[in-house]
Image: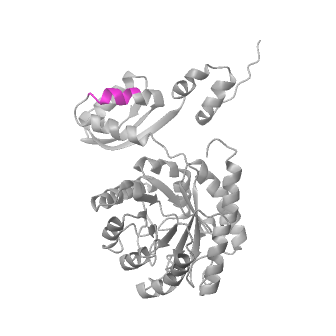
Amino acid sequence: MKDFCLKFINSRDICCELESIGFDSNYLNVAANKYRYINIKIYNLSLPQTNILKQTALSVGADCAVNKGVLTANVEFSDCILGGSIAQIMQILDKLRFQQFSMAELAEEISKQLIYYKAEPKIVGVLNLTKNSFSDGGLYYDYDSAIFRLNEIIEEGADIVELGAESTKPYSAPTSEEKQLEKLEPILKYICERNIKIPVSVDTRSGEVAKRVLDYGVSIINDVSGLTFDEKMANIIANAGVKVVIQHSQGLPENMQDNPTYNNVVDDIYKNLYKKLKQAKNKGIKQEKIILDVGIGFGKTKEQNFELIKRIDEFKSLGCKLMLGISRKSFLGLNEASNDEKDIYTVALNTLAIERKVNYLRVHNVKMHRKLIDIMKNFKEI
């Protein structure tokens, strides 16, 4: 009896595997799509839309899971999970473009979401100008220490420096606009006077603070409230034409960790960010200027945070670049550990984030993450 040697292979390695068996290189990329499988969740389709999608999927050998009530018409709407190889999905899209009930529009939307960002992640080096931030509060509160750390972050290889003058850790109180600007403006003046070219982000929920710092050439505003804390923020961002980080947060820092509850943490946050994205575009903010952040540690349990990290690539379907900020946060369960120890576990988790194609890593230890990215360049995934 013959012994068989076999292995299960990851679909992301399929090109290398096809090449290794001597497959025709001229047909490599086309063939690879027959072996790469994806699943797409589509929310709230009507019965006609659901049935068209299901039958179209079956016609090309793929499948589409629907609510059990669709068969007996006991439901008016159903979420659907469309699954198949990329080649099959492309066939489905071609067929949907000739269907009624807005299925052509659905085909275009799915087609757009099949495009993934391939660039390596950018490192956002955090500089907290506060007394009470969770990991380094007070370390860079005075001007000289802040300037020293600013230059250190740049030398260590950050792509972006993010300044923050308001702690938004759990149970922290708001910081006045005046106090934020008192800490931010001297650092921004230093950057301008020395013609430092590194892009600068400012972490603030205040429209007035955002407006003032934009005069110094700040290129990104990181609003942890997702444009909800200050109703003026969206218009200020739109008028300035700068990038904005829209983050999910359940509640305010003062109460966000008081029993955070979700029906389905990934779906609930996905839908919330979808809504925020739509509102931002309606205010005149261009989609390519929007960066989305699931808000690790902002109104989530430890288990919910890990679930979001594990499935972070699902948020790519929103069509925006993603930022992830897990650095030194309490969900790691290392509250009594040193920052050096926290950084080790942060790097370990951010390895997963890099594999999942997260575009921006918001970190405290820039040096370790720059080394991580350099190492991971040896893998074709990045």
| Residue located 41% across and 29% down the image | 90
| Residue located 64% across and 77% down the image | 149
Q: Please provide the residue range marked out in magenta.
A: 91-98
Query: x, y (%) of residue 310?
Result: 56, 51
Q: Nearer the viewer, residue 269 or 316?
A: 316
Q: Nearer the viewer, residue 74 or 128?
A: 128
Query: x, y (%) of residue 215?
Result: 41, 76
| Residue located 41% across and 52% down the image | 267
For the stretch drawn in magenta, the main secondary structure is helix
Q: Quadrant of residue 154?
A: bottom right
Check the image and report above or below for 326 versus 99.
Answer: below
Q: Nearer the viewer, residue 216 or 271?
A: 216
Query: x, y (%) of residue 350?
Result: 62, 57
Residue 305, magenta (yes or no): no
Q: Quadrant of residue 368?
A: bottom right
| Residue located 31% across and 73% down the image | 232
Quick check: 193 left or right of 235?
right
Residue 96, magenta (yes or no): yes
- Can residue 141 be seen from the camera position used here? yes
| Number of callouts | 0
Q: Nearer the viewer, residue 41 or 207?
A: 207
Query: x, y (%) of residue 144?
Result: 63, 85
- Can residue 257 be seen from the camera position used here? no
Looking at this rendering, what residue extends furthest in the top direction? 1
Quadrant occupied by the N terminus: top right
Q: Quadrant of residue 342?
A: bottom right
Task: Give the image's coloring scheme.
Answer: one colour
Check the image and report above or below for 207 versus 108.
Answer: below
